[in-house]
Image (cartoon, helix red, strand yellow):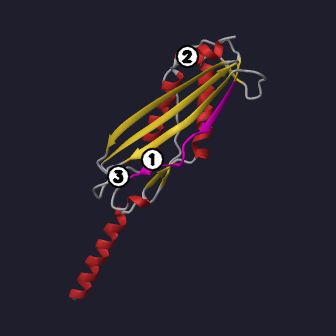
Amino acid sequence: MMNRALLGVVALFSLVLAGCASSPQQIKPEPKLLSPLAAVGQGQPVIVRVADGRSSPVLGTRGGLYPETSNVVVQGQDVLPRLQNQAEAAVRLLGFTPSPNAYNAPQITVTLAGLTYQSPKEGLYVTEADIGAKIRIDVQNSARRYTGNYGASLNQRFGMAPNQDTNTRLISDVLSDALTRAFKDPTIGQILSQQ
């Protein structure tokens, strides 16, 4: 009888430990412009490109008992099409016409320069996370060039370990903030509109 009780306790303990191990989360962020932009163009064509400038798709780890199994991952193919869509929308709001094949038109390149997710290393449970995003914008119009770097960050505390939906929302929010800050830079519109 004692052996059965002991086996039951060992089995229960194993389940608890297994519950502390987290599997990697594949995040598909949905960045969105958060505010209107002032139109400065008059429909001129602009070539809009996006690029992934990160060295790795791994943002970081959610921590916990087994941090090596709890990576937060955003693949380039899951974020670049959404960034392209929003960059083109921003260019339209600025008063220009995204034209991928325009000859000799001004160009704007939006690079995802960084995306990070950090949780405290100690402790069994994830109680908070620091999330950051960095966007670089390169504008070229004839001989005129401009590069701007924009960032956003968020510290989020949790009552329980965040699931994939929660992390998708948080990463999307930070990326949206960085993207909006980038396109609010008035220099971008000024250089694009110069003849």
Picture quadrant of residue 98 = top right
Q: Quadrant of the C terminus?
A: top right
Q: Residue at x 44, y 35 (%)?
A: 174
Q: Secondary structure at mark 1?
A: helix
First along the sequence among labels 3 and 2:
3
Rendered position, 178 above or below 5: above
In the shown orientation, is residue 100 left or right of residue 74?
right
At which x and y percent is residue 26? 51, 52
Q: Main secondary structure of the magenta part?
A: strand
Counting residues from the start of the chain, the first of labels 1 and 2 encountered is 1
Secondary structure beneath label 3 = loop
Quarter of the figure with the N terminus:
bottom left
Residue 33 circle label: none
Q: Residues within 10 Å of mark 2 (few under 14, many from 20)?
A: some
**Is 51 inside the magenta-drawn segment?**
yes
**Place of residue 54 in the rendered image (x, y in percent of width and height, measured from the top left):** 54, 43
Q: Is residue 168 shown left or right of residue 140? A: left
State the residue position of label 3: 161
The residue pinned by badge 2 equals 187
The residue at 51%/20% (across/down) is: 184
Q: Secondary structure at mark 2?
A: helix
Q: Nearer the viewer, residue 9 or 187?
A: 187
Q: Is residue 38 above or below residue 29?
A: above
